[in-house]
Amino acid sequence: MNPSLSRVITILGITSSGKTSLAVELAKEFNGEIVSADSRQIYKEFNVGTAKPEGAWENGKFIYKGIAHYLIDEIDPTDDFTLSQYQKLATEKLKEIVSCGKTPFLVGGTPLYLKAVLENWNIPEVKPNLRLRQELEQKDILELFNALKEKDPEAALITGNANKRRIIRALEVIAETGEKFSNQRKIGEPVFDYLKIGIKIEKEELVKRITERTKEMFKKGLAEEIKQLSEKYGWEITPMQSIGYQEFKDETNLDKIESLIIQNTLAYTKRQTTWFKKDKNIVWITSPKEAEEKIKSFLN
C-alpha cells in the first residue's frame, strides 16, 4: 500500500454476478460514489439491452438508489469512443470523488476499462486509416475475426467475435504500427492505490440469473427499444453490435432471439472469466459482509 496515493475500491465480476447492487450498498456504507466500468452502459439511449440502472439525472449527476454514478448514460451512440478516452474520463472522475471527501468505487465487468485505469496504461494514439477501414468493412465479421486471431490471438480474446468495429480497430492498429494490438499497452506510474473485490458466482446460479435477466429485458420493452434505435441509427454504430442488440439484426423470431442472447451472454462470461483468472490481485468474495471487512481493512 502506498499512503501517498488516493485509494479506490474496485467491484468487479462477470455479467449478472450482482456488481451494481453490491456496489450501491457498499457506497452507502462507506460514503462513496461510483464510476462505471461498463463499455455498454456508458452510451445514451441504450437502456434496456444494457441492463442500465433505472436512475435519473439530478443536478448533472446520474443518481441510482441515492448514489451518484459517473460514466453511465453519458456518451452519444454515434461517437467513436476509445479506451484512452474512457481511461482519461474515469481517472478524472475518481480523483474528483476523492477531492470531495468521498470514497471512489470503480465498478464493472469490462476488463480493459478496469485495467487501463488501475494500471495507468500508456495507450498510443493511432489515427484512423479511413481507406483501410472502408476496405475491412466490406469483409464478413467472421473473416475479420479469424484474421485478427491469426495476427494477435490475445487481441481476439479481448474483442470477441461479435463487435465488428472493435475487430477492425485492432486490425487497423496492427497495420499502422506493425506491432500486435495486445502489446501496445504499457503500464505507467501508479495513480491510485486500489483494492479489487471480485464477486464469485456458481455456474448454475449464473445461468439462472442470465436467463431471468434476459426475460425481464423483453418484458421491459427490449424489442421496442431495438426497433427505435435501429431505425434511428442503423446497425453499424458500436453499441448496436453489443450482445442484446446484434441478435435482432438478422432474426425476427423473438423466442430464437431470446435464446441467442442467453447463449451469447454466457459465452461472454467465459471470456470475462478468462481475463479475471489472470489477475492475481483480485480478492474474491461470496457475501457482502466479506466485502465490507476487506474494505474496512484496506481503508484503515
Image: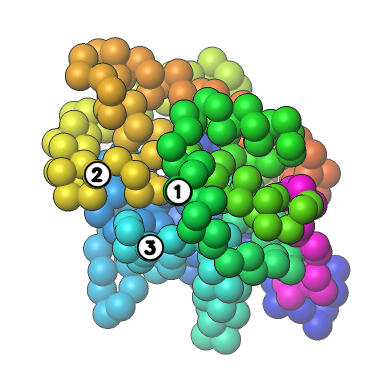
Q: Nearer the viewer, mark 2 or mark 1?
A: 1
The stretch drawn in magenta includes residue 7: no
Left or right of 50, for residue 146:
right
Q: Position of residue 98 (x, y in %)?
A: 59, 80
Q: Considering the numbered disc 1 on the image, is that residue within a helix, a strand or a loop? A: helix
Quarter of the image that includes the N terminus: bottom right
Can you identify the residue that label 3 sits on? 79
* Callouts 2 and 1 close, C-beta under 8 Å: no
For marks 2 and 3, give the CA distance.
14 Å
Instruction: Residue type at mark 3: give it.
Output: Asp
Q: Which residues are magenta?
A: 180-195
Q: From where the camera sits, is residue 218 visible?
A: yes
Q: Position of residue 263 (x, y in %)?
A: 45, 18
Name the residue: 49% across, 44% down: 135
Instruction: Residue type at mark 2: give it.
Output: Gly
Mark 1 or mark 3, earlier in chain: 3
Residue 298 position (above or below residue 288): below
Q: Nearer the viewer, mark 1 or mark 3?
A: 1
Quarter of the image that includes the C terminus: bottom right
* Callouts 2 and 3 close, C-beta under 8 Å: no
Mark 2 or mark 1, earlier in chain: 1
- Quadrant of residue 224 in the image? top left
Can you identify the residue that label 1 sits on? 134
Residue 289 position (above or below residue 250): below
Q: Which mark is residue 234?
A: 2
Q: How many neighbours does mark 2 have within 10 angstroms: few (below 14), some (14-19), or many (20 or more)?
A: few
Q: Position of residue 22 (x, y in %)?
A: 50, 48
